[in-house]
Image: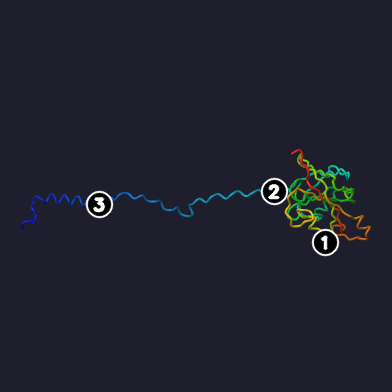
Amino acid sequence: MPLPFPSRALPVVLAGAVAALAAACAPSAAVPRTAPDAPAASRVAPAPAPASAPPAAPVASELSIPSAGVSGLRVVPYEGTTDDVAGTRLQDLGVAASPYGARGGVGPGQVGNFLVTAHRLSAGGPLGDLPGVKQGDTVRVAVGGVTYTYEIVATRRTSFRSERSLSEQRAAVPGTPGAAPTQAMITISTCATPEDHAEGNFWRDAQGNPEHRIDKIGVLRETSGA
C-alpha cells in the first residue's frame, strides 16, 4: 500500500520526532530552591543577656563623731534590722551594728539610709555622748581608704512600741517611709534609757532595749580619698 507522503520525506519526519522527544526529555531550566527551614530543635537561640550581679554586702567601717568624742568606732554590718537579736549581740561586744538587706539600710556613702546603732550605757558606752550632738556637727565614716563626711541635719526620737515610728527610723529616707531616696544619708541611734527612766518608763523589749531611741540624722556632704 502506498505511503500517504513521499518516502523521501520519512527521514525528515523521523528527525523531527527525535528532536521533539529529546526536547521533552531534556531537564527544564533550573529553578532556584530555597533551603528548608532548619528544624526548631537545631536552631541556635540567642544567648540570654547576662544577669546583673547583686550588690556587694557592705563591709566593716569606722565611725568618728568629733563632737561626741567618738573616734574610729568599728561599725559591723549584718543582715537584719535595727536592734534585732543579731544587732543587739554585736552592740554588746562594744561595737556599732549596721543592718542591711530587705529590712535594713545601705552601706557607707550609698544613696539611702546608712543605719548605725550602738550602746550608750553598757558595753563601754561608745555612744554615751550622742544626745549632745547638734545640727551642723560632722560625722565621718571611713572604709576602704575612702572617708564619707556627713552633716547632722535633724534629731528624731524612735519608739520600739510603735510600728510607725520604727518604719520612719528604718525608711530609705529617714522619717518618710515609702519615699524614694535621692541622696546618701545616715541614722546614728542609741538608747534613751536615762530619759525614759526620768519619765517613769521602765519598759524593755526581749533584748533588754528601752522603749525609746535617740536618732541623729545626717546627709552626705563630702567624699574624699576615692
* Residue behind mark 3: 25
Q: Nearer the viewer, residue 212 or 209?
A: 212
Whichever of labels 3 and 2 marks the residue nearer the N terminus, that label is 3
Residue type of the residue flagged with mark 2: Pro
Label 1 crowd (10 A; few <14 / some 14-19 / many >=20): few
Q: Nearer the viewer, residue 223 or 80?
A: 223
Residue 152: image x %, image y %?
A: 83, 47
Q: Secondary structure at mark 1?
A: loop
Q: Secondary structure at mark 3?
A: helix
Q: How many marks?
A: 3
Whichever of labels 1 and 3 marks the residue nearer the N terminus, that label is 3
* Residue behind mark 1: 162
Q: Is residue 178 left or right of residue 93?
A: left
Q: Is residue 195 above or below residue 56?
A: below
Indicate the quadrant containing the N terminus: top left, top right, bottom left or bottom right.
Answer: bottom left
Whichever of labels 1 and 2 marks the residue nearer the N terminus, that label is 2
Q: Is residue 38 left or right of residue 165?
A: left
* Residue behind mark 2: 55
Q: Nearer the viewer, residue 180 or 167?
A: 180
Q: Which mark is residue 135?
A: none
Residue 182: image x %, image y %?
A: 73, 50
Q: Nearer the viewer, mark 1 or mark 3?
A: 1
Residue type of the residue flagged with mark 1: Ser
Task: Determine which quarter of the picture holds residue 84.
Answer: bottom right
Residue 162: image x %, image y %?
A: 82, 61
Q: Nearer the viewer, mark 1 or mark 2?
A: 1
